[in-house]
Amino acid sequence: MRISPQWLREFVDVTADDRRLAEDLTHSGIAVEGITGTGESTVFEMDITTNRVDAMNHYGIARECAAIYDLDLQPIKPKLPAFIREEPFPIEILEPELCARYTARVISGIRIVKSPRYIAERLMIEDHHGINNVADATNYVLMEMGHPTHAFDLDLLEGDKIIVRRARAGEKLKTLDGVTRELHPEDLVIADATKPVGLAGVMGGFDSMITQATRNVLIEAAWFDPATVRRTARRHGMHTDASHRFERGADWGATTLACDRVAELILETAGGKLGACHDAVARDLTRLPIQLDRAEVIRILGQEIPSNDLTRILRRLGFALTWERSSSSTGSGTTVVAVVEKPLAYSVEIPTWRMDVEREIDVIEEIARVYGFNNFENTLPTFSGAVIELPHARAETLTRQRMLALGYDEAVSSTFSSADDTRHFTGTEAVPLENPLSDEAPVLRNSLAPGMLNMLAWNFNRGANDVRLFEMGNAFSQNGDAVAHHRRLCFAATGRTGPAGADRAPLPVTFFDLKGDAESLLNLFASESIKFEAPASAYFHPGRSARVLLNRHVVAELGQLHPKFAAERKLKQEIWLAEFDLDRLFAAPLRSPRYQRLSRFPVIERDFSLVLDDGVAYEKLRRTIEALKIQELISISPQELFRGGTVLQGKYSLLLRLTFQSVERTLRDDEVSAWSQQVIQAIESLGGALRS
Amino acid sequence: MYTVPTLDEFSASALDAAARELTAVLKSESAAISGESEWKALRDRWMARKNGILTQLNDKWLKAAPGPAKRDVGQRVNELKKIVEEQIDSAQARVEASAAVAQNESEHVDVTLPGTRRKLGTEHPLIRTLNEIVDVFKDMGYSVAEGPEVETDYYNFESLNFPPNHPARDTQDTLVIAGQQNKPARERLLMRTHTSPVQIRVMEKQPPPIRIVIPGKVHRADTADATHSPIFHQVEGLAVDTNITFCDLKGTLDYAMKALFGSSVKTRFYPSFFPFTEPSADVQISCFKCGGTGKLDGGRCSLCKASGWIELLGSGMVDPNVFQFAGVDPKKYSGFAFGMGVERIAMLKYGIDDIQLFYQGDVRFLEQFA
């Protein structure tokens, strides 16, 4: 919406220059977003908040100026001819809830001509090219005082009456924009004796519009129910100047004035004879006065507003104030009537144009905003109580820090996913959107993996091939009628790993890099058991993936992305991916480290070169050795793994290093040899043997 | 090549001459060697038990000396032996020192080659900014609260004083979950458009005093471009107690903005409209790039578009209707709420010109924040 400061100055004698005026308006909540033009053709581009429909016109903003600068506001007083033709014109409001008031006047014997120059120029502020003197008069009044009005060609209305009613099933109306609309039984229409002639509060009818042939007009100024206008406008996909105002609450009290003002402008150029004002009031929207307590003003704002300022501001805005004569009694038994110098409370009458002001707090806001927010002190509240952490805040922070420490960059990806992806990456039912932003991503992600793969692809396409990313966030699934949130962590490593320099080539990422990172993460949590079990879900490589069980619950899946999926996504390198269920992971308590005594005695290492059946997993070997419960065996570590060559098919060779140490004494050779023998026997029990 | 001469006579002068010659040869040979193998050859030539020069001295001089001269010759041979040992030792030290120098030289690196950097993970600039904001409020005594990203219409709108069919809802284009036509309007699920529903959820559960800071992801049906994203992040705050005033709101945000952007930053408040606060205020801070002057390096400051001010927060006093929805007595309690967009703050702070960069996972972008 645009405002001409020049036009404002016709209603209120502002001495501030335009720039200053724009600033002062903005500081009282009537935001001027931009200023164009200079001198008399200066125009303010306004950004009026949705609650302030009363300020979406020149007069409303002039009223704000009156309050800001404490100036008188010139009233709008249409000068109408003394002689008025009295003839009955029935207005039937069949829906008093939806149309509280309908005011109309007839002007007969007019001439349709172009509008005078000053009107045409002012309409151009909003880029309206003039239509004719009648239509322009309604638009001018809209810009001037904000009340939407409409003019019908009276001769095209049948039965000389107006009926405000709901549309009937099957009724159609061709609106001014030339579109024929099927009306809905909940639409409110303006009808003549036989048919709808306007969509109430939204747009007039095409067939009764003002044309060059029009000789007699009916001017409409009404008040329609905001929600009804909004529903109708939405239903028909329309948004008009009229609907914009009615759906925010037009001025119930302004219908006669708006009607008269339109009539005055028409008579100026069109001639004709004015008919009487027909004002049908179906419902009185006058509201009870609001009690404004000075103590409440201080309680909310924290600072006293001088009573002169308080009353001045409200009166200039059109609120009527009377003192509430209150007396306070103190003491017990004897009643002392205190003489109150400052009024303790006011009774405030709300002007009809302020539909947004309904409560004491709304009146307090009016005072505060015009008084100036920046005239209030800055204070800090006193508080009691303590800062309470969310249950998993620490686990979340540590998890994030661990991923960063492991060299993964933190990422944030889209919440939305393709339907295909949500089928491939989890078994949960994805949640579709009713109004997705794109057909490619119409559902909520139920896994973080597809988003991760998209980000990797993005990087590959830009020449970055060594990528490590992680994301923490919610995945979603349908849970009956509800939507379940699942806290997830996804991380991926691809390309080469380890530091690279001129003197050293980095190595490609392998399963064990990924697993090691997962282990480092798991190490944050206390666990009775951690197990990696092959394989993971079908989107992983069946031979290079695992489910991770923490205390016998699956907390993650990890491994290489299945080459088939990689190919489908045109990912031309191995992708190593892990997705953690953080709800499950965080169910485990954080591990608190325990000190273990350091030994001051030497360590003894023994290497065993073994040949094992492929069926014997390392885990089994380790457990078998651990089952010997040799206290001094402090580490079992695989050094080298080898298949092929001289090793028979179906077998593998493993160099295993055992480390022995006691915290109490230096170990003897014969002890270590005896343990080694036990170990070899245990290995042989698994079908393994020492390499000859 | 020097060999030990056989002496014809064992007079002092003859012995002197022979010793001089031997010493001169020793010195010149020891001075000539370089490297360990040459030194070993030198040592063996002079000191080997079998046929080394010292052994020869024993044989050719001492053993050959007539009885009366033996004592003098023995003494001279011993002296010469000492000289030989000293020379060989010092030659060894010399050789070792020069070998060490050579070794070090061969091991030298070009220190101007770039360092090998271990890959460090970098914090996402959004999450980093979000945490910075949250930390400021945590230090001021606010507890962190969270809520679901998929919300009901009731919590996202109705309880925050957006009545059904109200134009205020137009300002927040909403993504709605499909297939809920049969549910009552207030139970319908949607992607929360702001973090404010958490205010209600917390107030329902916990009586005042309340001081919470609410970080989170929100969604709106906005088409993505350089300044809009359907996904973005907010940090919201809420304080409710028996004594909270508009002046407290101002003071709190003024303090918080100084903590975030530096103590010289100023704030200013001007009226706005949010359905869930009354009065409502937008908050600007003085531009931290140009110091609020609007001018930078003799030109316009691009950050604040020469205005000297940057709009950063929405805020206000909690609307009594919201208290009523949440079951808090508005006659007894008052409170303030505020909220800010994390993307906007991160963009201003780091000079990022395209909001989409946050969601692409582009390592060329992310690694700039290491």
Image (cartoon, coloured by chain):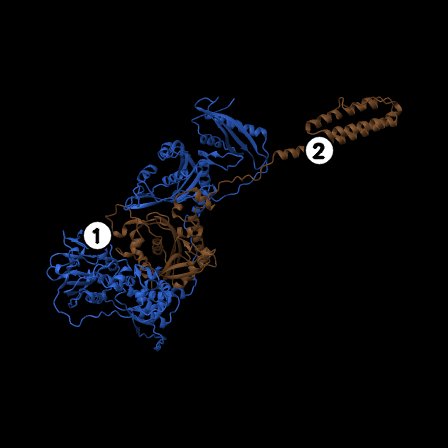
The residue beneath circle 2 is B94
| Horizontal arrangement in the rendering, residue B218 relative to residue A146 (left or right) | right
Residue A319 % position (x, y): 29, 69
Amino acid at the residue labelled 2: Arg
Res. B164 visible in picture: yes
The quarter of the picture where residue B199 lies is: bottom left
Pick the front one: B264 or A296: B264
SS assignment at label 2:
helix
The residue beneath circle 1 is A236
Q: Chain of mark 2?
A: B
Q: Residues within 10 Å of mark 1 (few under 14, many from 20)?
A: some
| Horizontal arrangement in the rendering, residue B203 relative to residue B111 (left or right) | left
Residue B100 % position (x, y): 66, 34
| Horizontal arrangement in the rendering, residue A180 relative to residue B304 (left or right) | left
The tint of chain A in the picture is blue
Q: Residue at x 80, y 27 (%)?
A: B22
Q: Which mark is residue A272?
A: none
SS assignment at label 1:
loop
Res. A389 visible in picture: no
The CA span between labels 1 and 2 is 103 Å
The quarter of the picture where residue A137 lies is: bottom left
Residue A155 % position (x, y): 12, 60
Q: Residue at x 25, y 49 (%)?
A: B183
Marks 1 and 2: same chain?
no
Pick the front one: B278 or A181: A181
Q: Is residue B150 above or below residue B37?
A: below
Q: Chain of mark 1?
A: A
Residue B34 % position (x, y): 70, 29
Amino acid at the residue labelled 1: His
